């Protein structure tokens, strides 16, 4: 038989649970999307432009939900509406084909004015980093160059999008290892062929026989992020030049952008 003290303790624990538990906000209950933000998306995000009305609404809901849980902070700059929308779009584009995806390993995105170095300094020489996923004491944070973020969504971006690249790293990391093999996303039957394709394509890049960004030869994780940029930025071209890689990424991201979502 429980004593009054035990009963009181149980009641207190239950009360604290309901007070401090994290509530999941249904997508249908997020605030209405502002017309000014919609106009910015139409002017700057080609992926959004190509969506039909139903999928645009879905994109807006996912984008708003992302921004409700992840802080966008400026370091040496003032964050503008466009910055928030482009960061959120970079997060939503790779996961748009999923039912609903939460970036559990991300709490904030820091925007620097331009390139930075390994010590997170954005002034002075020796600055070449455009974006990175934080580790160690920076775990749970992403750092992006605002100039690279905006360039990735410009007409001249070609096959590159730094912010999408970094969010793909987070997807890769979601299975516990940033190794270029997203085991919780990629269908199991594709994993061995995928690893084989990585090394075959790296060999072609090294010989100058591939149009994939040479940064992809750094390691398997960078290969996955680089080809994912290409997949989302130039899907028709990627499918034409790399049909096998394209097919695996279609299955991994649950999107077939060259022929329709």
Image (cartoon, grey):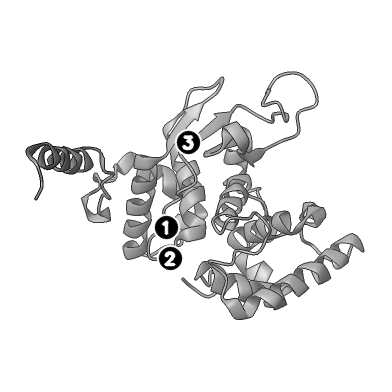
Element type where label 2 sits in the image: loop
Q: Residues within 10 Å of mark 1 (few under 14, many from 20)?
A: some
Distance Cα–Cα, label 1 vs label 3? 16 Å
Q: Position of residue 77 (x, y in %)?
A: 53, 22
Marks 1 and 3, the one that precedes in the sequence = 1
Left or right: residue 14 versus residue 188 is left
Q: Secondary structure at mark 1?
A: loop
Q: Is residue 201 left or right of residue 253?
A: right
Mark 3: secondary structure: strand
Q: CA distance from mark 2 to mark 1?
A: 7 Å
* Residues at marks 2 and 3, CA–CA distance in whole angstroms: 22 Å
The residue that appears at 33% across and 62% down in the rendered structure is 53
Which residue in the protein does label 1 denote?
A: 101
Q: Nearer the viewer, residue 77 or 177?
A: 177
Q: Residues within 10 Å of mark 3 (few under 14, many from 20)?
A: some
Q: How far from the left and from the top, in percent, is residue 116?
A: 69, 29
**At x 66% / y 56%, what residue is drawn?**
225
Quarter where residue 85 is shown: top left
Q: Is residue 164 visible?
A: yes
x then y, percent, for residue 18:
19, 43
Q: Earlier in the sequence, mark 2 or mark 3?
A: 2
Q: Please say if 2 is above or below 209.
A: above
The residue depicted at 66 percent of the width and 74 percent of the height is 191
Residue topped by disc 3 = 108
Residue at image mark 2: 98
């Amino acid at each position: 038989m429980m004593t009054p003290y035990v009963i009181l303790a149980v009641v207190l624990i239950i009360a604290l649970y309901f007070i401090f538990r994290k509530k999941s906000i249904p997508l249908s209950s997020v605030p209405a999307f502002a017309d000014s933000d919609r106009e910015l998306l139409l002017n700057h995000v080609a992926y959004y432009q190509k969506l039909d009305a139903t999928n645009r609404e879905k994109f807006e809901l996912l984008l708003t939900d992302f921004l409700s849980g992840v802080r966008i902070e400026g370091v040496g700059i003032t964050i503008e509406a466009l910055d928030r929308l482009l960061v959120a779009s970079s997060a939503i584009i790779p996961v748009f084909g999923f039912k609903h995806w939460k970036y559990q390993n991300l709490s904030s995105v820091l925007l620097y004015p331009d390139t930075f170095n390994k010590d997170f300094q954005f002034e002075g020489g020796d600055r070449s980093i455009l974006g990175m996923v934080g580790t160690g004491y920076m775990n749970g944070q992403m750092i992006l160059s605002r100039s690279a973020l905006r360039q990735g969504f410009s007409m001249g971006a070609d096959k590159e999008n730094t912010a999408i690249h970094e969010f793909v790293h987070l997807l890769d990391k979601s299975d516990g290892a940033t190794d270029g093999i997203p085991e919780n996303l990629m269908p199991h039957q594709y994993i061995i062929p995928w690893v084989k394709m990585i090394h075959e394509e790296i060999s072609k890049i090294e010989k100058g026989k591939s149009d994939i960004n040479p940064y992809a030869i750094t390691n398997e994780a960078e290969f996955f992020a680089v080809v994912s940029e290409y997949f989302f930025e130039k899907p028709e071209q990627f499918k034409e030049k790399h049909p096998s890689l394209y097919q695996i990424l279609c299955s991994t991201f649950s999107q077939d952008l060259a022929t329709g979502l």
